[in-house]
Image (tube, helix red, strand yellow):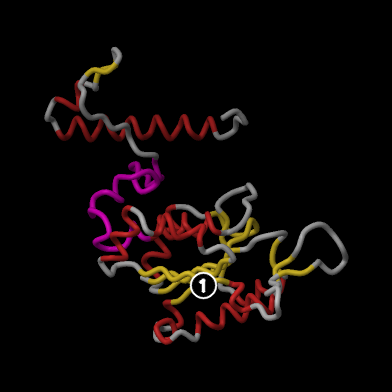
Amino acid sequence: MRFDILTLFPDMLRGPLETSILKRAQNAGLLEVQLHDIRDSATGVHRQVDDTPYGGGAGMVLKVDILVDALDKVLSDPQVAAVPPKRRRIILLTPQGKRFNQPRAHYLAESYDQVTLICGHYEGFDERIRSMVDSQISLGDFVLTGGELPALVIVDAVARLLPEVIKKESPEEESFSLRDAFGSALLEYPHYTRPLTFRDETVPEVLLSGNHAQIAAWRLERAQERTSQAQKDEHQLEV
C-alpha cells in the first residue's frame, strides 16, 4: 500500500516513518510512504503558500491553487496513476472531518492501494479544496497545529493492518477489534508478564492455570469491565 502525504513540514514526519514497524514494513515492500512538500508548488522569491482571508479575520489561509498543484503532481505520478481510481483515495485532514476510528482504519487498509493525505496548517484551507478530495478525516474534537500528526496516526493505524506487517492474531485481539457476543467493540483485556509478584501485586491465578477456556472467559470479562468503565469516564472532564 502506498501513502502520499502533502505537507509544509516533511521533517515532522520522517522520524516516526523511519522507526519500528513502519520502517520494517517499508523495507519489506509492504508499505510505501512518499512525502511531498507543498511549498514546492509555490512560486516567487518567498514561495508563499498562504494569504489573508477574504472578509478579514485572524490567521492565514492555505491557497487553493498551491494545494491543487501539489495534488496534481501526486496524481500524475506514473505509479499513482497506474492504480485504478476506485482503489485510490484523497483525504483532507481537518477538524470538520469524520472521526477516525478502528473500523475506518480497517476500511482504508482493505479498500485502497493508494491514499493521499493532505495536511493543513495555519488558520486552515481555502474552502474550495474540499471539492477536490474524496473524504475528510478528524482525529477528534480538539485542534492541532497541523495535519502532520493525524497523518502519522492514520498511516500507523492502517499499516499495521496490512497483511504480513505484524502477526495475524495481534490485531484481532486488540482494543476495538476485540468483540463481545453482540458484536460490540471492546477495549483490550489486561496483560501480565514476569515478575510474578511486584510491589504486592500478583498475576491473577487464572492466567497461570493453563486452562485456555477459563483464561478466554476471564479476558472477555475484564475487557467488558474495562470498556464499561471507559464509557463512564468519557463523560468526566478530569484526566
Q: Which of the 4 image quarters holds residue 48?
A: bottom right
- Residue 92 image point, x, y percent: 58, 66
Q: Is residue 29 left or right of residue 68?
A: left
Residue that appears at 68% across and 79% down:
65
Magenta stretch, main secondary structure, is loop
- Residue 108 image point, x, y percent: 42, 65
Residue that appears at 62% across and 31% down:
237
Q: Which of the 4 image quarters holds residue 159?
A: bottom left
Q: Nearer the viewer, residue 234 or 130?
A: 130
Say if 37 sits above or below 147 in the image: below
Q: Nearer the viewer, residue 159 or 38?
A: 38
Residue density around tag 1, few if under 14, some if 14–19, many if 20 or more, within 10 Å:
many
Q: In the rendered structure, does residue 167 fall within the stretch colored magenta?
A: yes
Say if 15 sits above or below 220 in the image: below
Q: Which of the 4 image quarters holds residue 98?
A: bottom right
Q: Which residue is mark 1?
A: 36
What's the residue type where badge 1 is placed? His
Element type at marker 1?
strand
Residue that appears at 38% across and 73% down:
113
